[in-house]
Amino acid sequence: MKNFTQKTIEKYHHDKTRLMDILIAIQSESGHISPENVTQIANELNMSEVDVEQTISFYHFFSMKPTGKYSIYLNNSVVANMMGRADTAAAFEKEAGITFGEVTPDGLIGLFETACIGMNDQEPAAIINNRIFTRLTSFRAKEIIRDIKDGKKIEEMFSASFGDGANRNNLVKSVVTNNIRKIGPVLDPDYKVGEAIRKIIRMKPEEVISEVKHSNLRGRGGAGFPTGLKWEFCRNAIGKKKYIFCNADEGEPGTFKDRVILTELPRLLIEGMAVAAYTVEASEGILYIRYEYKYLEEYLEKILEEARMKNYLGKDIMGKKGFNFDIRIQFGAGAYVCGEESALIESAEGKRGEPRDRPPFPVEKGYLGMPTVVNNVETLCSVVKVMLNGGDWYRSFGTSESTGTKLLSISGDCRNPGVYEVSWGFSVHDMLEMVGTTGNVQAVQVGGPSGSLIGSDEFNRTLGYEDLATGGSLIIFGEKRDLLNDVVVNFMDFFIEESCGSCSTCRILPNVLKKKLEKILEGRGVEQDITDIETWGKFLKASRCGLGQTAANPILTSIKNFRHLYESKVQTRKEYDTGFDLQQAVKEACEASGREPNI
């Protein structure tokens, strides 16, 4: 293992900013990163061991303890639970003879829980040694454990045919399905690769920016910052080198549209990054992909190599002298907060993915201190279509404030979960009709846990920046779902787990709010507890990044729109209840001493 570590460090030229790549390689090779590995890495990269360890400890898929020859990470998202995860989990534990968080004594099997893995349309799902298993049942769990004990390779354990489209590619061979339900301008597969590059190299960069600004294209990751303006800021920034980052770290539970684009339209994405690079005069691009999609690595590397061969990437692209740009892939290692652009940059530099203080913004001082554009997958794909068809064409879709189309990841209690491309201004009611619901709908989670939980009285609201902004996740809950116990608690657990811990507000308040919620659910709450949650939840706005600022949203939006659920559980005509039982607290001591409690 020492030799493998040495070769890996040499592969990345003893560059400590590539620490993530080094750790990922070692974790994949041996199932953990040992203290000896840490010492060797620290010495070779001229770092302290503490710095190496703090990076390891930050990411979910790194471990300094063995995780088993076969590491099973079962998704514990809301939708996975809705679709029968409990039975699947129980079967895994029974057949493996261990509980989640443990490794079998022989080191063969490790069982672990993990947050949403981008498979909400085909749950329950798990990652086993970087391969995805979807639509799991208790029977399939038994089969998988049996195959593991029989010594089968991962690729021999699939019981279903490979998925559709490029999921069947020899470099992918995945059972994942795309579930593309509605195609619009962005998902249209008939576009000709390279045409946007050919067009923009005949234009001045300022003209490209002007067209993008005219289209009113806004970031599709959720924040909605105007794309053309971001590019203009970066172009005007001073720096020896500039970078284009594609943020493919879609960690928001319920979102999977970027996974579909990476699978079916990676060439469109690459072309979008090249257009951005030409515009801001960037020479290097980094495609930052969440670790859960590592099964696409070989396929995507092949696509990049193909782009270089056709001169869509490389030196003097498409004959344009001085237009030099290439892309490398950077994988994360399991951290939701890395979806925030500055945290993503920190991670790409080999560090903990903790958000930076701003200003300065990445367009001024980003990756390695240089001006950096960070755009979402869908945004960069939309740019290509804007350049091919013009800003006026793009503005013909959507609304005046929210132009163009939006890719939606829809899951939950519906007949047709999947990816839908619709024009902004589409109502929630229209969406429900489009996907076909399975019974009466009680609520819809718009924008993932960081968004809003709305009820039927708001289904006439529209998706758009002027009303319901969303990065793309929509989860449907039928009337039989327990919104507080099954949804809100799960979302709060997610935010607590994913906090980087940097801000005291985000580190402390979600735990405090969850305890208040649990008190109410246990029947010990009073009306003041609801008021306290509403008041204290506002303090999270002081957090550094979007994760902390929205960490109370699951509770706050459910109180706002489903207050009756809370009021039905609190004690009436009672102003105070600590929940502390003094008699129960002294019971054990009294029994041991033979005394009667004097209360």
Image (cartoon, rainbow, N blue to C red):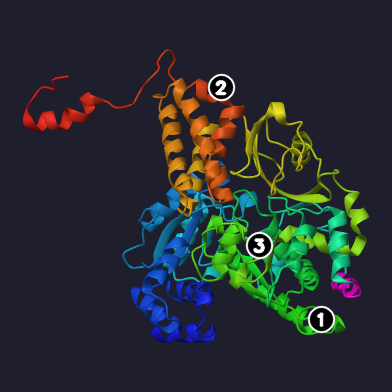
Q: Earlier in the sequence, mark 3 or mark 2?
A: 3
Q: Earlier in the sequence, mark 3 or mark 1?
A: 3
Which disc number belongs to residue 534? Answer: none
Q: Nearer the viewer, residue 155 or 116?
A: 116
Q: Indicate the position of residue 124 as horizontal and vertical percent values.
A: 56, 50
Query: How many residues crowd mark 2 within 10 Å: few (<14), some (14–19), many (20+)?
Result: few
Q: Which residue is farthest left?
A: 594
Dot 2 amino acid type: His
Dot 3 amino acid type: Asn
Spatial distance from mark 3 to mark 2, Cα to Cα? Answer: 39 Å
Say which quadrant the C terminus sits in. Answer: top left
Which disc number belongs to residue 247? Answer: 3
Residue 84 in view (yes/no): no
For the residue labelled by badge 1, is the local secondary structure a helix, a strand or a loop?
helix
Q: The magenta stretch spans which residues?
A: 193-203
Tell me which corner region of the image, top left, top right, bottom left or bottom right, holds residue 30. bottom left
Which disc number belongs to residue 564? Answer: 2
Query: How many residues crowd mark 1 within 10 Å: few (<14), some (14–19), many (20+)?
Result: many
